[in-house]
Amino acid sequence: MMGLQELMLGDLERYEKDRETWMLYLYTPMCGTCQMAGRMLEVTLEVLPGIECRKANLNYFPDLAGKWSVESVPCLLFFREGELAEKIYAFHSVPYLLEKTKEYLL
């Protein structure tokens, strides 16, 4: 299982270039909703092993908000064929995240 691993400074460009299909979870550590969304995403990744997903603290990646027009956190970005396919802000539930993940990444 790949799980939800922190994206490190300097890794984003390489990660984008090397991966066609993946997800990026954007959060801030003081956001309570982000903590709940992160737990739901971890459960989703346990159910769908092998999905490429990284997380990034927007406090360390402020340029990402502008790059992908991120309006708030938590935010989950789906990349397909190397391009941003969708971003979601409302995580709703684990079944919702499972369906969204299957829609874009499987």
Image (spheres, rainbow, N blue to C red):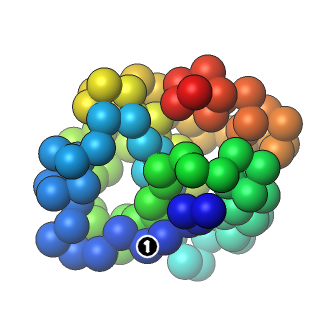
Quarter occupied by residue 8: bottom left
Horizontal and vertical percent position of residue 25: 50, 54
Instruction: Give me the residue at 31% from left, 35% from top.
Output: 20
Horizontal and vertical percent position of residue 2: 55, 62
The residue to which callout 1 is attached is: 6
Determine crowd level at label 1: few under 14, some 14-19, many 20+ residues with C-alpha closer than 10 A.
Answer: few
Left or right of 98 on screen, residue 25: left
Horizontal and vertical percent position of residue 19: 29, 44
Instruction: Give me the residue at 45% from left, 60% from top.
Output: 54
Residue type, label 1: Glu
Q: Is residue 72 visible?
A: no
Return the residue nearer the eye: 69 or 43: 43
Q: Is residue 100 visible?
A: yes
Return the residue nearer the eye: 103 or 74: 103
What secondary structure is found at the residue carrying circle 1? strand
**Is 17 placed above or below 37 here?**
above
Quarter occupied by residue 13: bottom left
Instruction: Give me the residue at 57% from left, 50% from top.
Output: 50
Left or right of 51 on screen, residue 80: left
Horizontal and vertical percent position of residue 61: 27, 66
- Disc tally is 1
In which quadrant of the rendered image does the C terminus lie? top right
In which quadrant of the rendered image does the N terminus lie? bottom right
Left or right of 3 on screen, residue 72: left
